[in-house]
Amino acid sequence: MRVLGLDLGAKRIGLAVSDEAGRIAFPAGFLERKGRRRDFAALRALVKERGIESAVVGWPLHMSGRRGPEADAAERFAQELSATLKIPVELLDERWTSVAAERALQETGRRVKQRKGRGEVDAIAATLLLATHLERRRPAGPEEPGEP
């Protein structure tokens, strides 16, 4: 089952897609936000093109776990995305994904302060979010037949 990961931002949506087995997350770029209708049309095309069967949206809770306006907006986005694309959409706490994405890029020696680089951070954040989601869905126990 191929899964889409989305890291919502005011200017961009970071994108990640899993492999067909739903085990590995890969960055899939970012979408410059151009209004709800155009954003959803672009996401609909991506879902169709890649054979996406479900999605996970980052849920930006405060560090205390409290919900704020951004979390409420993510919830509305996820509900509308599910209704529009006719796929299940889940929310996942994303408190550390953008920070972890920036650190990962800095460790490779890349600069992320430029406007162009911010989209790359968004895609990496979506990938980390999706990887966490996929890991949590895996059943406990041996992953491959024959493993102890």
Image (cartoon, grey):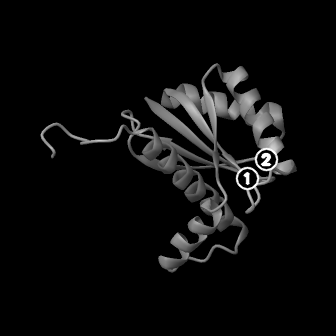
Q: Residues within 10 Å of mark 1 (few under 14, many from 20)?
A: many
Quadrant assignment, res 99: bottom right
User: What residue lies at 60% left-to-right and 25% top-to-bottom?
Assistant: 88
Q: Quadrant of the N terminus?
A: top left
Which residue is under mark 2?
Answer: 71
Quadrant assignment, res 78: top right
Residue 34, horizontal then vertical, whole percent: 81, 43
Looking at the image, residue 77 lies above or below residue 124: above
- Horizontal side of 74 relative to 25 (left or right) equals right
User: What residue lies at 55% left-to-right and 58% top-to-bottom?
Assistant: 124
Label 1 amino acid?
Pro
Are the residues flagged by discs 1 and 2 in contact, CB closer than 8 Å?
yes
User: What residue lies at 56% left-to-right and 51% top-to-bottom?
Assistant: 129
Circle on res. 95: none
Looking at the image, residue 141 lies above or below residue 50: below
Which residue is under mark 1?
Answer: 60
Q: Earlier in the sequence, mark 1 or mark 2?
A: 1
User: What residue lies at 66% left-to-right and 33% top-to-bottom?
Assistant: 43
